[in-house]
Image (cartoon, rainbow, N blue to C red):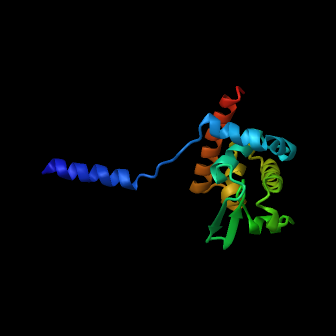
C-alpha cells in the first residue's frame, strides 16, 4: 500500500513540475543566420548574445508571435515580444511589430535605454537591466525578473559557446 502512495506522490510531482527548455545550438544559430545582420545593426551597447537569447526565449524566432499580457492589458508582439504599450511609449509604431527588422530595432532600442539607465544607477555588472526587459525597470529586483535575467544569461552563454566565442 505504501508503494502506491509513493507512486502517486511521484506522478503528482511530475505532472506539476514545469519543464524549462533550453535551445540547441541549431536553434540559436538559426536565429543568428536569419536575423544576425539586423541584430548587429541595432544592438548598440547590448551584446549580440543577449539579443539572440531574448529572441529565442520570447518567440523562438517567430516574427509573427503574439501573446496577450493581461496584467498590462497589452499585446506582446514579434521576435522580441515588444509590448504595444512600450512601443507607443517610446514613440514607435506598434502596427509594424510583426516586421522582424522593425521589431529588433525597437527591442534593441528598449534594451539600450534599460542598459543606460543601469549605467546611471551603477548597476550594469549585476545585469538587472536584462530582467527589466521582461518585468519593467521598477521591478528589476523581483524574483521573476531575476529568473528571466538568469535564463537569458544561460542562453547567451550557450550561444557564445555555439559560435566558438
Q: Position of residue 127 (x, y in %)?
A: 70, 45
At x 77% / y 65%, what residue is drawn?
Answer: 86
Q: Is residue 11 left or right of residue 151?
A: left
Relative to residue 127, is residue 85 depicted above or below?
below
The answer to whether any part of residue 60 appears in the image is yes
Residue drawn at x 36%, y 50% is 14
Q: Position of residue 135 (x, y in %)?
A: 66, 59
**Residue 116's x, y, as percent?**
82, 50
Quick check: can you spot residue 125? no
Quadrant of the rendered structure where residue 63 is? bottom right
Q: Residue 44, how many percent across, how many down? A: 85, 44
Q: Nearer the viewer, residue 159 or 110?
A: 159
Q: Residue at x 67, y 39 (%)?
A: 28
Q: Identify which residue, 55 or 62, lies in the foreground.
A: 62
Q: Quadrant of residue 145?
A: bottom right
- Identify whether 100 is placed above or below 150: below
Q: Quadrant of the C terminus?
A: top right
User: Looking at the image, which residue sits at the far left?
Assistant: 1
Residue at the limit of the structure toward the bottom, as seen here:
73
Near-viewer residue (3 or 163): 163
Above or below for 102 versus 69: above
**What number of labels is visible?**
0
Amino acid at each position: 500500500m505504501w508503494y502506491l502512495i509513493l507512486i502517486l506522490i511521484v506522478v503528482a510531482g511530475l505532472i506539476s513540475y514545469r519543464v524549462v527548455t533550453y535551445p540547441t545550438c541549431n536553434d540559436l544559430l538559426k536565429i543568428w543566420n536569419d536575423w544576425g545582420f539586423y541584430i548587429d545593426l541595432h544592438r548598440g551597447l547590448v551584446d549580440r548574445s543577449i539579443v539572440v537569447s531574448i529572441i529565442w526565449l520570447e518567440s523562438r524566432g517567430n516574427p509573427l508571435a503574439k501573446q496577450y499580457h493581461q496584467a498590462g492589458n497589452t499585446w506582446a508582439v514579434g521576435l522580441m515580444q515588444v509590448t504595444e504599450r512600450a512601443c507607443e511609449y517610446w514613440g514607435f509604431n506598434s502596427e509594424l511589430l510583426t516586421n522582424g527588422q522593425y521589431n529588433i530595432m525597437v527591442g534593441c532600442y528598449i534594451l539600450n535605454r534599460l542598459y543606460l539607465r543601469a549605467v546611471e544607477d551603477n548597476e550594469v555588472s549585476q545585469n538587472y537591466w536584462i530582467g527589466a526587459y521582461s518585468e519593467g525597470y521598477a521591478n528589476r529586483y523581483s524574483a521573476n525578473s531575476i529568473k528571466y535575467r538568469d535564463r537569458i544569461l544561460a542562453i547567451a552563454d550557450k550561444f557564445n559557446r555555439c559560435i566558438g566565442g
